[in-house]
Image: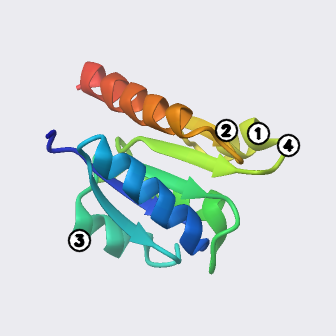
Amino acid sequence: MNDKTVLIFDDDVNILEVCSIVLEACGYHVAVSETSHDIIEKVTEVKPDVILMDNWIPDIGGVKATQLLKQHLDFKHLPVIYVSANNDIHLLADTAGADAYLAKPFDLVDLENIVAQVLLDAEHKN
């Protein structure tokens, strides 16, 4: 069991459920949110090690929510994995300031791998 926490922002309950099950099976603590307008409050409360951010999430959307996070002094170091079904996901992730991205629909092994890789990269930065 590791002590890393993943915070997932997605308004699709099925995706939240599947991602939670997979990541918890990998030993992560998982917290979820179906909205993004209160991202700073959520991050303050949960203290995640990595964030999965959906593009089409109410109320302000993934790009704006990620930008808010990355502009915040206490949280700009937090790695964000941008998740979207859009064809231009790499551009969206770039615009948002995300650290990585995962295209929907994604393979669950890819989910596990990208979370592990981003956490590893974050540890090497510190």
Residue at image location 65% in from the left, 42% down from the top: 106
Q: Amino acid at mark 2?
A: Asp
> In whole angstroms, how far apart are the C-alphas of marks 3 and 1?
30 Å
Q: SS class of the residue under badge 4? A: loop
Q: Badge 2, how many Cα within 10 Å: few under 14, some, many 20+?
A: some
> In whole angstroms, how far apart are the C-alphas of marks 2 and 3?
26 Å
> Looking at the image, which is closer to me, 47 or 15?
15
Q: Amino acid at mark 1?
A: Leu
Q: SS class of the residue under badge 3? A: helix
Contact between labelled residues 1 and 3, with CB atoms less than 8 Å apart:
no
> In whole angstroms, how far apart are the C-alphas of marks 1 and 4?
9 Å
The mark nearer the N terminus, 4 or 3, is: 3
> In whole angstroms, how far apart are the C-alphas of marks 2 and 1?
5 Å
Which quadrant of the rendered structure holds the C terminus? top left
Q: Which disc is residue 87 wearing?
A: 4
Residue at image location 41% in from the left, 30% down from the top: 118
Q: From the viewer's perspective, is 67 left or right of 1?
A: right
Contact between labelled residues 1 and 2, with CB atoms less than 8 Å apart:
yes
Q: Amino acid at mark 3?
A: Glu
Regarding residue 65, the answer to whether it shows in the image is yes
Q: Position of residue 22 (x, y in %)?
A: 41, 48
Q: Which disc is residue 94 wearing?
A: 2
The mark nearer the N terminus, 4 or 2, is: 4
Eye-nearest disc, 4 or 2: 4
> In whole angstroms, how far apart are the C-alphas of marks 4 and 2?
13 Å
The residue under label 3 is 45
Regarding residue 67, the answer to whether it shows in the image is no
